[in-house]
Image (cartoon, rainbow, N blue to C red):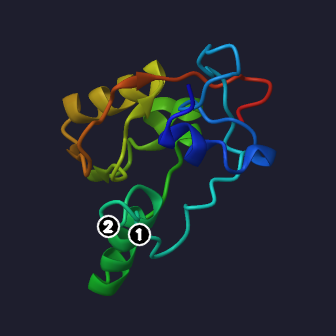
Amino acid sequence: MVTELDIETCEHREYGLSTYDHFEDGAGVCFSSYLRPVINMRPKYRMSSMNITWQFPADLSISAWIRHQGYDCDFITDEDLDREGLDAIRSYNCVITGTHPEHVSERMLDAQEDFVAGGGRLICMGGNGYYWVVGFARDNPA
């Protein structure tokens, strides 16, 4: 049975499957890549169902606010945090997550916990956070 959600997620099969998709035999997709284009991840994109920015477009709103306020900041990717662990964030006073920090590796979570235990401040900007466990292939992190 094909649902409305299935039709929406299958619309651009040429981009590959996401972990929210299923194979034709019903098995869930468990491998993905950040090289897979996500066509709704662009500045000011609003979800049609709720007319709000979400995930990357919402993160861009936060970075625009930081820039507008004149704060100095750096951006560290999930891959950076997984690869470098605590060393990636140790020198900062405060770390702010993105608006949807749902997918984390054990190393990313350990780094954030050690950062806070060492006196750092962590601002979690999302709900539904720290839910899925991910892993990066060392020979091909994408």
Rate crowding at label 2 as few (under 14), some (14 to 19) or many (20 or more) other CA atoms within 10 Å. few
**Is 31 above or below relative to 17?**
above
What's the CA distance linking mark 2 and mark 1? Answer: 5 Å
Residue 134 percent coordinates (x, y):
52, 23
Q: Quadrant of the N terminus?
A: top right
| Residue in the picture at 76% in, 47% down | 15
Q: Are marks 2 and 1 in contact (CB under 8 Å)?
A: yes
Taking depth in this image into account, of 111 and 97 the one nearest to the observer is: 97
Q: Tag 1: residue type?
A: Arg
**Is 38 above or below relative to 1?**
below
| Residue in the picture at 25% in, 52% down | 125
Q: Secondary structure at mark 2?
A: loop
Residue 42 percent coordinates (x, y):
55, 69
Mark found first going from the N terminus, 2 or 1: 1
| Residue in the picture at 67% in, 50% down | 11
Q: Residue tagged by mark 2? A: 52
Number of numbered discs:
2
Q: Secondary structure at mark 1?
A: loop
Occupied quadrant, residue 70? bottom left
Q: Residue tagged by mark 1? A: 46
Taking depth in this image into account, of 117 and 31 the one nearest to the observer is: 31
Q: Tag 2: residue type?
A: Ile
In the visual, does 127 lie left or right of 57? left
